[in-house]
Image: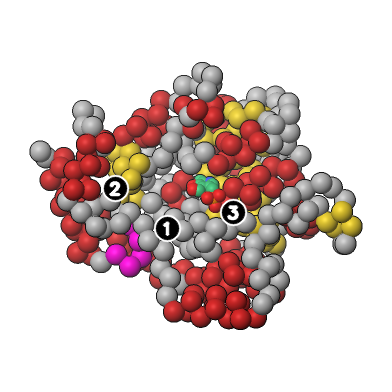
């Protein structure tokens, strides 16, 4: 079976984790700090605060921006539900924004149009690693704080800088489906010292300089995770380069048959996910089933979040998000995948489409 995704874990990762286990220092310490500094430097941000997941990063980001009941937050309708759920968990209202038909991200026009007098922040997603239109969005939103959900986008580039550099707070995920992994893990990036201090306080029981100043949870990263992350960082360039090669191969092999995600001019995706839109009339479940029988695991691409049970009662209509969620198929893509495997995926998919 050609799997949908597989993290690239080698001997370096195993040695790094074993060394932590031998040291007995398992919870947040020097390695977490080194990992934070390395990622901050990579993305060109002043501060990085490692946390236990990408979802925790989003939740803490909203908390630091004092988002709560009575507030609204703009949020793309097409995504894994984490960003919208985080807004709900904060007690605020999600103002869903549809996505662009080619880029599958919310554009500056859509974000501007969805903004109301109650809007206190915008979540901007670099979906599947595809960069949002950073410069235009920043200009369109003016002083409105942006939380960039760059969960999938480490190693991707806007036309004018790395993904992870857009938000007042930008959030990363290190889940195994992401570009590099720490098992579970996440990170907030910011240039604001005060924001960084609050994030550190909120991840650690609300402690500031030894005092418990607010009631907060435990969202720390372990040393085991940070050791894994530091070893994975050494591979980042190779991981991204290989993903780009495989995506280029898919585009060449599938060129006339299907639509996929486009990047804004000058921007470059890391292809955390390679998705295609199935033509109307084909039953996606049956396509997946047939591909599975022929040795290829294909996944559901994403969700129209406003249609999920967690937003039951929402009367939002987001036609493009609904279309991509209903027709989208994720194809296998992982850095150790061979060209022959990508060719096999394309052959099987085209075979199923032509039946
Ligand atoms: C766009 C986006 N945001 C946030 C998350 C949440 O990350 P985590 O699984 O680390 O909580 C994901 C995970 O799939 C995601 O795709």
Residue at the outermost left position? 355
Is the C-beta separation of discs 1 and 3 under 8 Å? no
Image location of residue 309, percent across then percent down = 50, 28
Residue 332: in magenta span: no
Q: Nearer the viewer, mark 1 or mark 3?
A: 3
Q: What residue is drawn where x is 42% and y is 58%?
A: 270
Q: Is residue 79 left or right of residue 256?
A: right
**Ligand 1 within 8 angstroms of badge 3 C-beta:** yes
Q: Look at the image and give the residue range highlighted in magenta.
A: 333-337
Q: Does any portion of residue 205 appear in the rendered image?
A: yes
Instruction: Classify mark 1: residues with Cα within 10 Å, few (<14), some (14-19) or many (20+).
Output: many
Image location of residue 285, percent across then percent down = 26, 36
Earlier sequence position, callout 3 versus callout 2: 3
Q: Label for residue 270?
A: 1
Does residue 61 lie above or below 97 as drawn? below
Q: What residue is drawn where x is 29% and y is 60%?
A: 246
* Element carrying mark 2: loop
Image location of residue 221, percent across then percent down = 64, 62
Q: What residue did someone put label 2 on?
A: 298
């Amino acid at each position: 079976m050609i799997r949908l995704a597989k993290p690239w874990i080698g001997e370096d990762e195993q040695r790094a984790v074993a060394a932590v286990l031998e040291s007995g220092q398992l919870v947040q310490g020097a390695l977490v700090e080194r990992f934070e500094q390395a990622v901050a430097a990579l993305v060109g941000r002043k501060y990085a605060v490692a946390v236990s997941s990408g979802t925790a990063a989003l939740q803490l980001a909203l908390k630091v921006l004092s988002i709560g009941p009575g507030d609204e937050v703009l949020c793309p309708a097409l995504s894994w539900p984490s960003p919208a759920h985080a807004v709900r968990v904060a007690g605020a209202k999600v103002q869903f924004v549809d996505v662009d038909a080619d880029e599958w991200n919310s554009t500056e026009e859509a974000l501007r149009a969805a903004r109301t007098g109650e809007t206190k922040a915008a979540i901007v997603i670099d979906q599947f690693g595809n960069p949002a239109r950073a410069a235009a969005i920043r200009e369109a939103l003016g002083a409105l704080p942006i939380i960039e959900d760059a969960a999938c986008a480490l190693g991707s580039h806007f036309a004018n800088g790395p993904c992870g550099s857009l938000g007042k707070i930008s959030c990363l995920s290190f889940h195994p489906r992401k570009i590099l992994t720490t098992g579970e893990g996440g990170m907030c990036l910011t240039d604001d010292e005060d924001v960084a201090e609050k994030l550190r306080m909120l991840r650690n029981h609300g402690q500031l300089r030894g005092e418990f100043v607010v009631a907060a949870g435990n969202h720390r990263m372990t040393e085991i995770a940070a050791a894994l992350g530091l070893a994975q960082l050494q591979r980042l360039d190779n991981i991204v380069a290989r993903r780009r090669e495989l995506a280029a191969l898919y585009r060449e092999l599938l060129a006339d048959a299907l639509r996929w995600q486009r990047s804004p001019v000058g921007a470059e995706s890391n292809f955390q996910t390679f998705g295609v839109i199935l033509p109307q009339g084909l039953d996606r479940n049956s396509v997946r089933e047939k591909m599975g029988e022929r040795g290829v695991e294909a996944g559901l691409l994403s969700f129209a979040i406003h249609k999920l049970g967690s937003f039951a009662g929402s009367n939002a209509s987001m036609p493009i998000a609904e279309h991509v969620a209903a027709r989208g198929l994720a194809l296998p893509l992982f850095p150790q995948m061979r060209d022959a495997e990508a060719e096999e995926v394309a052959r099987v998919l085209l075979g199923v489409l032509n039946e």
